[in-house]
Image (tube, rainbow, N blue to C red):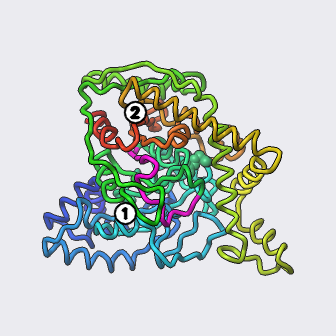
Amino acid sequence: MSNSSVSQITSLTALQLAARLRGRDLTVTQALDAYYAAIDAKEPAYHCYTSLCREHAYARAAQVQARLDAGDVRSPLAGVPLAVKDLICTKGLETTCASRMLAGFVPPYDAAVIEKTAAADMILLGKTNMDEFAMGSTTETSAAGATRNPRNPDHVPGGSSGGSAAAVAAKEAPIALGSDTGGSIRQPCAYCGVTGLKPTYGAVSRYGLIAYASSLDQIGPIGRDAADCAALFGIIRGRDPRDGTSVELPPDTPKPVQGLRVGLPREFFGEGLQPEVAAAVLAARDRLAALGAQIVTLSLPLAAYAIPTYYIIACAEACSNLSRYDGIKYGHWSRDAENLRETYVRSRSEGFGMEVKRRIMLGNFVLSSGYFDAYYKKALQAKRLIQQGFFEAFGRCDVILGPVAPTTAPRLGESLADPLKMYLSDIYTVMVNLAGLPALAVPCGEDSAGLPVGLQLIGQPFDEATLFSAGYGLAS
Ligand code: GLN
């Protein structure tokens, strides 16, 4: 396949590609050939994937092509290749969470989102790189090595879904799935200049998602634009009896941008925000106003407590979720151990990386007797108040607009040296997970170095449709 036909195919959005496949201008195999050629050419520079599944993909392509030829079109994205973050279980294909702990783990079942995208005739290209167990904001804590930002490879792609966002930005995938516990879809989208949705908690089944912090985790789409994300969200959402927190969504009733009340919290534009990021987000505010939106200034007074609240709750849940990796039931087993205790200690010491260990220690600390009330219980109370703050704000507005992150993508290596600083960069995203709300990250400009800036639109529960309609408005 020539370079120009590869770039013609990989430049299409997922919906444009699907239309070509339906119109029989292209075959599914040609689409796969183009993407695997792009991957072969660009992976040495960016390292978006932890593994590829060519054989599986071409076998699926033949089945999907037969259906398209017969006019049996199963979804708006039928035939479209898909990249999937490597913490979503794929039957028969290695799923590592970018950790030594799960090296070689081949799940015996598919996650709900994998079943749904397969039923929609999407085709898995491979698994994408991430921060180990989704803990991090740069994809540098991956045991497989860092991913680089396709917009400037000296910079990080963000994280933890950095591989998925970078794959979409580098045109190594038309569309991808990521997961967001405290910003892991939105922040890498902002850093790489692509679009991504963190759905309302409960909108998408977590069955088969390897847990980080179960009360905050959500799987969501990452795409070239809001329309692609809406199409993939339409495929993966809905109730699943295997995830008791998932719910059936009400029918979409998007509010038009004309007359939309857009809230700007003062706390999102204060100290620590890179001036170029503020300027790009405020320019987007002006574009929304020009489209007829009504701008409302408001306050989220508990924003200052979001980071400690999030890190206490996330680490508490993580240390409990990760206790299953004991060297016996799952994952890395240290064979030199001489007794049971040593098996636990050695397997976990060897299997987990630094950041994961730090969080396990933090989590055990805040849950230990004597500290439980002071930290964990307090954090749950703060979470409730943060949620209430949002609901009060939604009395005055329909969506909330803010930056995704205080800065554009840091340089590789900068964040690892100072984990606290890295945690602080989650300031605008973690609140949304604590409140269980949906939020769409949309590119809105560049800084003076040419690095992308992203904004987020935060919505009311299950009102993803309004976020998408404002997202289209901003892009057009
Ligand atoms: N950066 C945040 C953390 O490290 C968020 C990660 C995520 O959403 N998975 O916990």
Q: Position of residue 156 (x, y in %)?
A: 56, 47
Q: Position of residue 23 (x, y in %)?
A: 13, 63
Indicate which disc, 1 or 2, sits on the residue closer to the N terminus: 1
Where 419 sits versus 139, above or below? above
Write the residue at 55% across / 63% down: 210
Residue at the limit of the structure toward the right, as seen here: 338
Is disc 2's CB within 8 Å of ligand 1? no
Residue underneath mark 1: 82
Write the residue at 22% across / 55% down: 16
Q: Quick one: SS at disc 2? A: strand
The residue mark sitting in front, 1 or 2, is: 1
Residue underneath mark 2: 445
Quadrant holding the N terminus: bottom left
Kindly identify the amino acid type of the residue bearing the numbered disc 2: Gly
Write the residue at 26% across / 79% down: 62
User: What is the span of residues highlighted in magenta in the rendered image?
Assistant: 194-211
Q: Quick one: SS at disc 1? A: strand
The rendered magenta stretch, by its main secondary structure, is classed as loop
- Mark 2 Cα-neighbour bin, 10 Å: few <14, some 14–19, many ≥20: many
Write the residue at 36% across / 74% down: 57
Image quadrant assignment for residue 396: top left
Horizontal side of 412 relative to 399 (left or right) equals: right
Kindly identify the amino acid type of the residue bearing the numbered disc 1: Leu
